[in-house]
Image (tube, grey):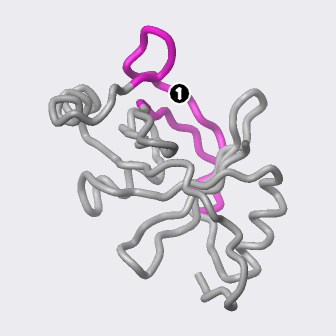
Amino acid sequence: MEKKAAGKSNYTKIHHVGVVVKDMDKAIAYLESMGIGPFSAGPNMKKVTIPFKGELHGKPAEWKTTISNANLGGAELELLEPTEGNQALKESLEATGEGLHHIGFLTENLDEAVKQQTKLGAKIWTKSVMPGQRNFVYFEGTALGNIAIEIRDV
């Protein structure tokens, strides 16, 4: 991404930090044993597998991801296990292993936010736009640590 001119940031509050993992159950067990959590994906569920449909590198794609979240003082720690299909998470896991994948922000106007970011030089890595789900876009990893930026509907 090109450097934004000094001034007001478009994103002033982190919504979540996404971490890609190989084995969700092991990741949850380890983090909870360290006092981080509890992890949840809804009432009486530690994790959930969600199907997505969208694009990867500008081409149609479908995939499934297993997800679990822990609230950490106003921001979420989001664990993500690529479960099925080609997806950005799987690419990251294969390229660099488990670890920090993205920093996520919310927006009330995803289309406008994407236009702003691409105008600044950001390149879309993947996106999912499906009725009834929170739509999101991951921009390609940053020069700093190859961290992706996610913008998601409120």
Q: Quadrant of residue 126?
A: bottom right
State whether residue 143 is above or below residue 5: above
Relative to the observer, which residue lies in front, 28 or 82? Answer: 28
**Residue that label 1 marks:** 50
Q: How many marks?
A: 1
Q: Secondary structure at mark 1?
A: strand
Say which residue appears at 36% left-offset and 27% top-offset.
39
Q: Position of residue 71 (x, y in %)?
A: 44, 35
Q: Tell me if residue 51 comes above or below residue 98 in the rendering.
A: above
Which portion, as a residue range, is magenta?
40-68
Identify which amino acid the numbered label 1 is placed on: Ile
Q: Is residue 73 left or right of residue 54?
A: left
Q: Position of residue 7 (x, y in %)?
A: 71, 85
At 74% across and 53% down in the image, what residue appears? Answer: 107
Q: Where residue 70 sits: x, y (%)?
A: 40, 33
Residue 30, quarter of the rendered image: top left
Report which quarter residue 25 is drawn in: top left
